[in-house]
Image (cartoon, rainbow, N blue to C red):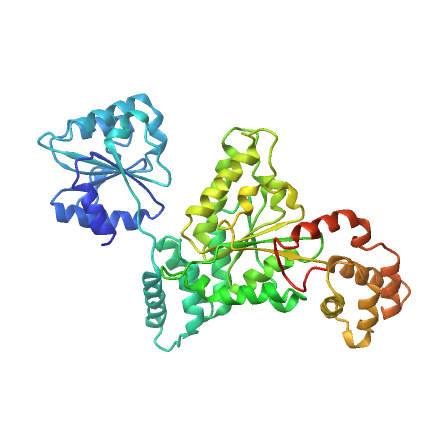
Amino acid sequence: MNDLHDLEVVLRSEMPILLIESLEEPRLLELLGEIGLRLQLPVFCWTLTDGLRPLRGRALPSGAQTDPPDLLRHIKATTRAGLYLLLDFHPFLEHPLHVRLLKEIAQGFNESAPRRLVLVSHALESPPELRHLCARFELRLPDRHRLLALIREEAQRWQYADPKRSFRASRSAVEQLSRNLLGVAESDARRLIRNAIIKDGAITESDVTEVTRAKYQLLSPEGAVSFEYDTASFAEVAGLERLKAWVDLRRGPFLAADQETDCPKGVLLLGVQGGGKSLAAKAVAGRFGVPLLRLDFGRLYDKYIGETERKLRDALRTADVMAPCVLWCDEIEKGLAVDSGAEGPGRRLLGSLLTWMAERKSAVFLVATANDIAQLPSELLRKGRLDEIFFIDLPGPEVRREIFAIHLRKRALDPGGFNLDDLAAASEGFTGAGIEQAIVSAIYAARASNREPSTESIRTQLGATQPLSVVMEAQIAGLRQWARGRTVPAGAELS
């Protein structure tokens, strides 16, 4: 089964009008020309610039039937059967005269000279009067085998242009590139592959990253979903050993995403503010080696009824097309907090999200982060929606020691020059974010005095502020109490 066969089957049916939404106009014209030969029907093509002309063969006089009313009256009056392709006709479907003429042409389809209308555009909404006379067709998106074939074709094309050239490719990069291009139209996939090869005559890991970014830009990211270009590796996350081990076990099944193994769905990361939930979400994408998309619930809400849910559906559709990927819903409780009214926007968003979570077939791993479990709806927390709920507690002494080392190295400071054990003891009750801020403040203070930061200067900054465990003592105690027995500790056991 392929596009040519499927399109021929649709055109052999009794539907007089076929609507095709696609940006691959040259490919469609090639397919329809081939089908015209198979059906032994002439194929005519209309554009607003050139009017009506044969798709193949001798052209009609310039400017013939350029106006839509003249075109439709001509097709209605002709006694010659054929396929009539109308390109970018969508702006004219709102005019009553055009709709009436299209309807009359369609109603005369079973006469001695059937005229099949094929409307091709980037977007087509059929008028209500014509819906019972229309069928729709979608070009197939290339699968992994087709994408691998496109990579081979473009590599051969590049070498044939100059036989002295040598082409290099990493097997893993080719496999990953073919996987990351899923969901892209064939013409766009070919262009992205060609650009990657032309740059340096090779397909490498860096090409995979650039092509993935280009793919996201192709999908119009001007919405509630943003592309996180840099995902942290697990080496940059201190502690969280249980979460790391859990993700490692599911990496293979997630990337394989076959029918015999259940694809991992996602996790909820619950914990105190600044405890490293966001970094952990980025690290999951880095460990899987897939793109990270961030869903901003604040950009979903719209004053117009129905627009909020539409924006969420568009965002989730983007994630489906970008699969395999990780979809990060940061502070999800702010977007899905239970409304006072049963039909509030939060409730409608929840319904749309739960439906997608239950029905999605794509390899999209959901990572939701939350600070306040009390605001989350119970429907989201039940087993089956997500695979697991992890609790990220305040870091213990060993983890705090590791956090100090990570942030010192990030700022070109040698951890060996600091007493990390002393700093770990002095930072009892601090989160990772609090520790980072103490280091930054110590650097500012030291550089202002033309000195280098030291263990003592960092201790001074730690003593100048209260840790989160003191500032939010009651909230943290309540969160820990809820998490005990209900969640899996991401690192050490809950104290």
Query: Could one spot residue 435 in this view of the protein?
Result: yes
In the drawing, does residue 354 fall left or right of residue 12? right
Residue 493 place in picture, x, y as percent? 67, 63
In this rendering, position of residue 263 left or right of residue 95: right
State the residue at coordinates (41%, 73%): 171
Relative vertical location of residue 70 with respect to residue 349 in this rendering, above or below: above
- The quarter of the picture where residue 377 lies is top right
- In the figure, 478 relative to 180: above or below? above
Assign the N terminus to one quadrant of the image.
bottom left
**Quadrant holding the C terminus:** bottom right
Residue 127 % position (x, y) = 32, 27
Q: Residue furthest right?
A: 449
**Image location (x, y in percent) of residue 417:** 81, 76
Residue 448 rendering spot, x and y as whole percentages: 88, 62
Question: How many numbered marks does the figure carry?
Answer: 0
In the current view of this chain or complex, which residue is farthest to the front?
A: 485
Horizontal relation, residue 195 to residue 376: left or right: left
The vertical placement of 19 against 199, above or below, is above
Whether residue 454 is visible, yes or no, is no
